[in-house]
Image (cartoon, coloured by chain):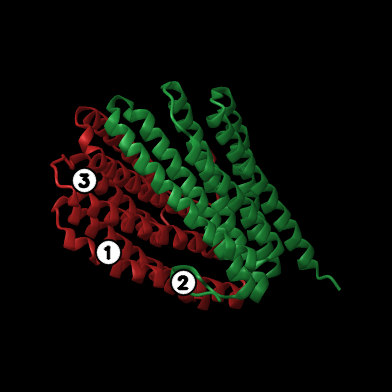
Chain colours: A red, B green
Amino acid sequence: MERQVDTQIEELKKHILSMGGHVEKALDIVIQALIEKNVERFKDVHTIEEQINGDHIKVDDACLQFMAKQGPKARDLRLIFSMVKINADLERMGDQCVNIAFTGKDFLSRGGSYSLQVIEEMSVIVRQMVKESLDSFVKEDSELAKKILLMDDEVDTRKSAVFRDLSAEIKKNPSQVEACLDLILIARNLERLGDHATNIAEDVIFVSTGKDIRHGGKFS
Amino acid sequence: MERQVDTQIEELKKHILSMGGHVEKALDIVIQALIEKNVERFKDVHTIEEQINGDHIKVDDACLQFMAKQGPKARDLRLIFSMVKINADLERMGDQCVNIAFTGKDFLSRGGSYSLQVIEEMSVIVRQMVKESLDSFVKEDSELAKKILLMDDEVDTRKSAVFRDLSAEIKKNPSQVEACLDLILIARNLERLGDHATNIAEDVIFVSTGKDIRHGGKFS
């Protein structure tokens, strides 16, 4: 027999998933705008961010209501607890996309020609991390969540490459410092998006296994 | 008559406050090391970060236990809910201090002479924001919390000044790009510390007034 709380938890999950869909869309928009040099496209991120912010308040409210009415225990409580945190991560992921839009707009306005290959590679991995962190949350699949933790290393490697290449570029071409700094900041934003997806994966592992793997706690 | 839950809530608050004290200490250490060019001093931040990480897991556990046993409602529930979020913010503030230590160490290893005046000014404001956000939390003082939101603008102004000055410096002196990038990243870390203190202040306002002022919600 399905418990009434299960239905409510499924509703909450759907809400988080829809919010995650908005974050994925925001990321797609800003990366597409950057790669295609389409300044106008950046504007679309602001409508999506408003939706994300609306979702954020609604999910927080719904979690509060659920806790007040159901007084969940054990696994249900861990799940709601994780939703509160995942909600906060998703909201900040929306902020990072908006940051990319602002910096990306500055970058395009400066003209110049730079290879965006590594940034694009980073964005592909981060996009996958966001998607799979949400999949792992919905399915409560800790094995999938563990894979996301490994993907974060790939993002970090590429971020370091962006820093190194652009530092060299600035030395060769100091008048281009602003454009290079823009790309460095965008690489940082993507890195932070990956960090938030990693936080979500860690929360999923906590819910599924009851084990806290943050701060060097081990999973096996 | 004092409720038993009040005693438990006071205990949780004390735990958060002690964790906040560790974050303040971590910030003091890394800024002092940077200003005094004392590379060895940076190492001390790692011991403090371990304490912060230990606090983080303990506070999360204690909040989970409290919710499971007491099934808090209304204001108590909002307060516990906020503690979970403040706990996450404090943990990430610890991470930012560690990031400053790593970048600061790189910066000092490069030699060179740069004015750290604006970075120092930023750190003084951020230090005050961290302290007062915790004060406002313990006293549940929404008026003090509102002041913190205004201080964040001062941090952002200074961060922009650091970006502008160092971009100009790089153009004049392109061989110094790595050292200048280090300082730009440190300014970003300080900005993020200020953002986390702002998150705490917003949570305090939410607990005290029940009003959600995030995402353009108004307080008056």
Dividing the picture into quadrants, the one containing residue A215 is top right
Q: CA distance from mark 2 to mark 3?
A: 32 Å
* Residue tagged 3: A120
Rendered image: mark on residue A45: 1
As shown in the figure, which amino acid type bears the numbered disc 3? Glu
Q: Secondary structure at mark 3?
A: helix
Check if mark 1's residue and mark 2's residue have beta carbons within 8 Å.
no
As shown in the figure, which amino acid type bears the numbered disc 2? Ile
Q: Residue at x 21, y 45 (%)?
A: A120
Q: Are marks 1 and 2 on the same chain?
A: yes
User: From where the camera sits, is residue A220 visible?
Assistant: no
* Residue tagged 2: A57
Check if mark 1's residue and mark 3's residue have beta carbons within 8 Å.
no
Crowd rating for badge 3 (residues with CA inside 10 Å; few <14, some 14–19, many 20+): some
User: Looking at the image, is mark 1 or mark 3 nearer the viewer?
Assistant: 1
Query: Is residue A16 positioned above or below A113 on the image?
Result: below
Subunit under mark 1: A
Q: Is residue A183 left or right of residue B74?
A: left
Crowd rating for badge 2 (residues with CA inside 10 Å; few <14, some 14–19, many 20+): some
Q: Position of residue B91 (x, y in %)?
A: 56, 47
Q: CA distance from mark 1 to mark 3?
A: 18 Å
As shown in the figure, which amino acid type bears the numbered disc 1? Val
Q: CA distance from mark 1 to mark 2?
A: 19 Å
